[in-house]
Amino acid sequence: MATPYRETYLAIRRNIESVMVGQSEVIRKIVAALISDGHVLLEDYPGTGKTTLAKALARSIGASAFSRIQFTPDLLPSDVLGVSILNQKDQSFEFHPGPIFASILLADEINRASPRTQSALLEAMAERQATIEGRRYPMKDPFFVIATQNPVEFRGTYPLPEAQMDRFAMQLALGYVSAGEEVQILSAQEKRHPLDALSPCAEPADIRAMKEAAKSVAISDELKHYIVQLVGCTRTQSAVQLPASPRASLALMKAAQALALCDGSEFVTPDHIHTLAVDVIAHRLVLDPQAKFSGLTGRAVVEECLRTVDVPA
């Protein structure tokens, strides 16, 4: 069904696809995360386009307030949140906001920073505010965090704590594109990067309107029970030490509503839930060390739950 919101989504997708080749499904999910008020963790190998995707999304929605933080071991919380500096003229302290006060924040290589610095993002991601020196500072709307990390590099990194992982609505991976698509990338960047020519096709006000509209997308009680059963399934697995919480259920419901809106549907279907379940739930699970050693992953646990939990008719 053609709706103004679907047209906006398609315009954003086409805009990003002019830069990101072969990533239509990831783009679909990341836009759904944006309009469901969630955040995204991109975990993939270097050079797959994680930073380019974040920049393309920001430019597509005219988000002039785009910030990129390169996380390093010596990065301090004040480097993220901001700091008060003494004004010599009137001998008063003035607060200088940090890069976190942006519409779209790219937290590049987030696992290179210490847990103390990583935790500087927790309040902002969960409550859309930052408390600094006893004062509350609201975040922009939209406020969307895209964090990246390298899954194969461990030297000089700090694994994200469970509380941090739980703040991300989805964990996505771009993966390698096909040979033909890689040739397209070479041709597109032969003379200049296509990102340089990217212009906005939507405004932050359009995203705010889509966020409100997504809340009105119908979801039946049967599908709500289905979501709860899927999340509850992770609590019955002996290999799972820390299962998914109700926050996972909420994230899955909101993301499914947003995805339905992008698809031009007036209601959520089981397919929307199936499409997102692994990306929303798997990264929140902490597995038993023995199970991890044997090769079991959070994604495999959620995929098994999708097979065993009955889909509502």
Image (cartoon, grey):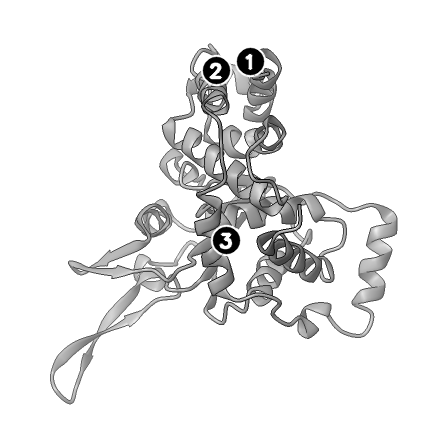
Give the number of marks.
Answer: 3
Distance from the alpha carbon under mark 2 to that under mark 1: 8 Å
Q: Position of residue 27 (x, y in %)?
A: 64, 49
Q: Quadrant of residue 241?
A: top left
Marks 3/2: CA distance?
Answer: 31 Å
Residue placed under numbered mark 1 in the picture: 309
Number of other residues with Cα within 10 Å of mark 2, as a class: few under 14, some 14 to 19, many 20 or more: some
Viewer-side label of 2, 1: 1
Q: Is residue 191 above or below residue 12?
A: below
Q: Report the amino acid beneath label 1.
A: Val
Q: Sequence order check: which comes first, mark 3 or mark 2?
A: 3
Assign a secondary structure to mark 2. helix
As drawn, is 96 to the left or to the right of 197? Answer: left
Q: Residue 91 appears at what percent x and percent y? A: 11, 83
Given contact means CB atoms under 8 Å apart, are the residues at marks 1 and 3 in contact? no
Contact? badges 2 and 1 (CB < 8 Å):
yes
